[in-house]
Image: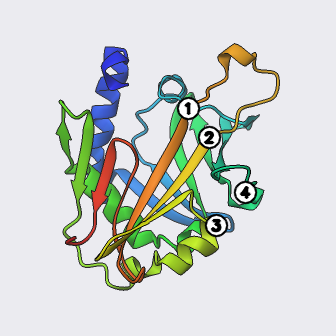
């Protein structure tokens, strides 16, 4: 997808990658009643950039300072199984003068991914390696997380996100694949609706006690030796 983005959008994405190298300088993590809000101290991305990247708000609200998007992903299960709507994934994006100023991480997700782990993941993405031929990004985190990695255990992932779309087991690893599709506003013409699905893979140790890696189709973060 990056190959088809306008040059100005691509440059702004590079700016964000540079900011991720200095997370403490460019971002603030603020706890709220709803969860943890990641605040951009030097906003770079615009609402139009996110739309080009496929981010579609289910609903939006105009406030005194700007606009708030509610973004949701509907969970998918194989066959005719109907997932619990409580296990859909959602977040809020806040904009001021069309610039993205914060992203909300709901409180329930922090049970799996504590703030220290989230911030360390952001730092790792700032130092990530980009493989042009594979069209993928690989990030390695060198920090020792201890309890944070154990937080995203098999049992905790099940409690927070419900049953996965697929479970694969090998001698030393357990891989959980969760599948989602975008929830879009009512009234969008059928031909404009997206039928693309999104997958998130969590790699745990063989007992399901410790997170080793996580990633989407083109971005992966390695937390521990596998």
Identify the disc placed on residue 7.
none
Q: Are marks 3 and 4 in contact (CB under 8 Å)?
A: yes
Q: Residue at x 19, y 72 (%)?
A: 225
- Kindly identify which residue carries mark 2: 181
In the image, residue 104 sits, relative to residue 70, either above or below, namely below
Q: Element type at marker 2?
A: strand
Residue 182 in picture, x, y percent from top left: 63, 38
Measure how far apart labels 4 and 2 are at the Cα level: 12 Å
Labels in figure, total: 4
Q: Residue at x 37, y 79 (%)?
A: 210
Left or right, 193 with respect to 95, comes to right
| Lower position in the chain sequence, tag 2 or tag 3 | 3
Q: Residue at x 47, y 73 (%)?
A: 114
Measure how far apart labels 2 and 3 are at the Cα level: 16 Å
Residue 55 in picture, x, y percent from top left: 56, 33
- Kindly identify which residue carries mark 3: 162
Residue 23 falls in image quadrant: bottom left
- Kindly identify which residue carries mark 4: 83
Q: Residue at x 49, y 28 (%)?
A: 46
| Lower position in the chain sequence, tag 3 or tag 4 | 4
| Lower position in the chain sequence, tag 2 or tag 1 | 2
Identify the disc placed on residue 196.
1
Q: Element type at marker 3?
A: loop
| Lower position in the chain sequence, tag 4 or tag 2 | 4
Q: Are marks 2 and 1 in contact (CB under 8 Å)?
A: yes
């Amino acid at each position: 997808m990056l190959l088809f983005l306008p040059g100005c959008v691509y440059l702004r994405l590079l700016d964000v990658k540079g900011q991720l190298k200095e997370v403490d300088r460019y971002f603030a993590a603020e706890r709220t009643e709803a969860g943890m809000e990641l605040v951009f101290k030097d906003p770079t991305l615009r609402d139009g950039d996110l739309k080009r990247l496929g981010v579609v708000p289910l609903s939006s609200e105009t406030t005194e300072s700007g606009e708030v998007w509610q973004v949701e992903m509907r969970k998918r299960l194989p066959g005719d199984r109907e997932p619990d709507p409580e296990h859909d994934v959602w977040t809020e994006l806040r904009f001021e003068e069309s610039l993205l100023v914060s992203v909300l991480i709901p409180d329930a997700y922090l049970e799996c991914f504590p703030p220290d782990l989230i911030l360390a993941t952001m730092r790792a993405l700032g130092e990530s390696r980009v493989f042009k031929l594979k069209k993928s990004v690989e990030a390695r985190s060198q920090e020792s997380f201890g309890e944070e990695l154990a937080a995203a255990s098999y049992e905790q992932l099940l409690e927070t996100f419900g049953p996965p779309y697929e479970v694969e087991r090998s001698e030393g690893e357990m891989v959980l694949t969760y599948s989602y599709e975008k929830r879009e506003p009512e009234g969008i013409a059928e031909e404009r609706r997206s039928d693309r699905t999104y997958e998130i893979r969590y790699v745990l140790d063989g007992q399901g006690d410790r997170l080793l890696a996580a990633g989407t189709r083109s971005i992966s973060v390695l937390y521990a030796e596998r």
